[in-house]
Image: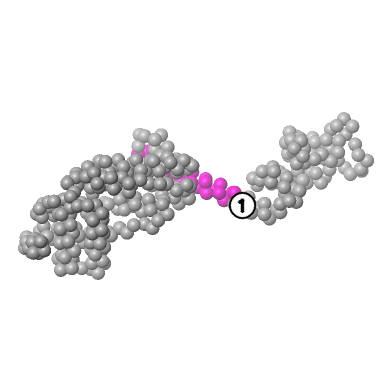
């Protein structure tokens, strides 16, 4: 023992004073994080008051989540406490976000498993949001979308285009908000009503499509935008501007399917327009855009409603229908 008159404490006494287990104190001393101040002739460790305060600091830093090597650096003065606190706050923030992500998945899983017998599969699919396996996340969505394309009975050119378009690549990691979006996407993709809606909008009659998909994708959005603009201006379905847009819409789809323009054809066309029940479909693409970091696609809800109203007007008004047919004949 040294000759200093400073009061020293045995490891047992230090444990009682601080509440830190003897085993832990011994370990800190062995790794030189808390060196013993002195030793007795029997080689028992002794600790000064300063060492006890250092042990208290170590305990507090451990409670705050600091690692032993970080604590060693702080004690040696190589890392300022301010910097260390900032680092720890960042780490804790990340942990909070991760717990929020887990909470979101579990809450969605709790709801989903009440409605589905495939609870384990559902939990797995929802849990992909927390996984670092980007490939699995991408594969899940891509396979679901590809299955819809295959069921739609489309011509090969259209099928090939949509399969490429619906090959989705997941972001590396998902934010808490994207986790919420993912859980909703999983729920939608597993909903039979969503599949039914998707197939309704791409009915088996589409198998006779004759128009090049690139050409269709150039003309259709333009007409939909025109219909949306007319709807927002308050144009009624029977007005000349709306009927002109509608005539071009009918002509485009008749050319697309090589069908005669009859009231029955107009009725079929009206059933293939998005309806208020199609909000699920719009919600899905909004969520997918958010997951991909893109702006949500416009819904054109009012424009589609105006086209549907215009079709109903033509179906119920034989005179207007004949006038539309005459106009189309003159354009040929």
Expressed as whole percent of the image width and height from the top left, the position of residue 112 reads 38, 40
Quarter holding residue 163: top left
> Which residue lies at the image location 34% right of the left edge and 57% below the top edge?
297
Q: Which residues are magenta?
A: 91-115
Expressed as whole percent of the image width and height from the top left, the position of residue 141 reads 37, 43
Expressed as whole percent of the image width and height from the top left, the position of residue 182 reads 41, 47
- Residue 159 vertical placement versus 286 (above, below): above
As helix, strand or loop, the secondary structure at mark 1 comes to helix
> Which residue lies at the image location 64% right of the left edge and 45% below the top edge?
65
Quadrant, the N terminus: top right
**Quick one: 108 or 301, which is closer to the camera?**
301
> Which residue lies at the image location 35% right of the left edge and 37% below the top edge?
116
Quarter holding residue 119: top left
241 left or right of 12 in image: left
Do we see residue 156 in this rendering?
yes
Residue wearing tag 1: 89
**Quick one: 321 or 259, which is closer to the camera?**
259
Q: Residues within 10 Å of mark 1 (few under 14, many from 20)?
A: some
Secondary structure character of the magenta stretch overall: helix
């Amino acid at each position: 023992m040294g000759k200093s008159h400073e009061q020293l404490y045995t490891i047992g006494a230090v444990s009682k004073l601080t509440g830190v287990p003897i085993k832990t104190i011994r370990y800190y001393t062995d790794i030189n994080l808390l060196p013993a101040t002195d030793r007795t002739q029997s080689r028992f460790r002794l600790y000064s008051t300063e060492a006890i305060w250092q042990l208290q600091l170590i305990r507090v830093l451990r409670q705050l989540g600091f690692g032993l090597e970080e604590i060693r650096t702080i004690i040696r003065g190589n890392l300022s406490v301010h910097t260390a606190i900032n680092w720890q706050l960042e780490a804790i923030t990340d942990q909070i976000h991760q717990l929020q992500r887990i909470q979101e998945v579990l809450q969605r899983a709790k709801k989903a498993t009440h409605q589905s017998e495939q609870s384990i599969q559902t939990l797995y699919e929802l849990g992909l949001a927390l996984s670092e396996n980007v490939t699995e996340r991408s594969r899940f969505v891509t396979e679901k979308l590809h299955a819809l394309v295959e069921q739609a009975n489309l011509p090969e050119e259209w099928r090939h285009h949509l399969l490429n378009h619906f090959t989705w690549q997941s972001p590396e990691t998902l934010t808490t908000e994207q986790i919420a979006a993912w859980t909703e996407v999983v729920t939608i993709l597993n909903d039979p009503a969503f599949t039914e809606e998707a197939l309704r909008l791409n009915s088996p009659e589409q198998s006779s499509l004759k128009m090049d998909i690139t050409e269709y994708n150039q003309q259709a959005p333009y007409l939909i935008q025109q219909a949306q603009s007319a709807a927002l201006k308050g144009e009624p379905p029977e007005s000349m501007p709306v009927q002109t847009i509608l005539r071009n819409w009918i002509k485009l789809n008749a050319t697309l399917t090589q069908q005669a323009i009859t009231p029955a054809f107009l009725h079929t066309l009206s059933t293939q327009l998005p309806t208020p029940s199609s909000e699920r479909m719009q919600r899905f693409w909004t969520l997918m855009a958010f997951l991909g970091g893109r702006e949500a696609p416009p819904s054109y809800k009012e424009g589609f409603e105006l086209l549907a109203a215009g079709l109903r007007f033509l179906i119920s008004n034989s005179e207007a229908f004949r006038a539309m047919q005459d106009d189309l004949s003159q354009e040929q």
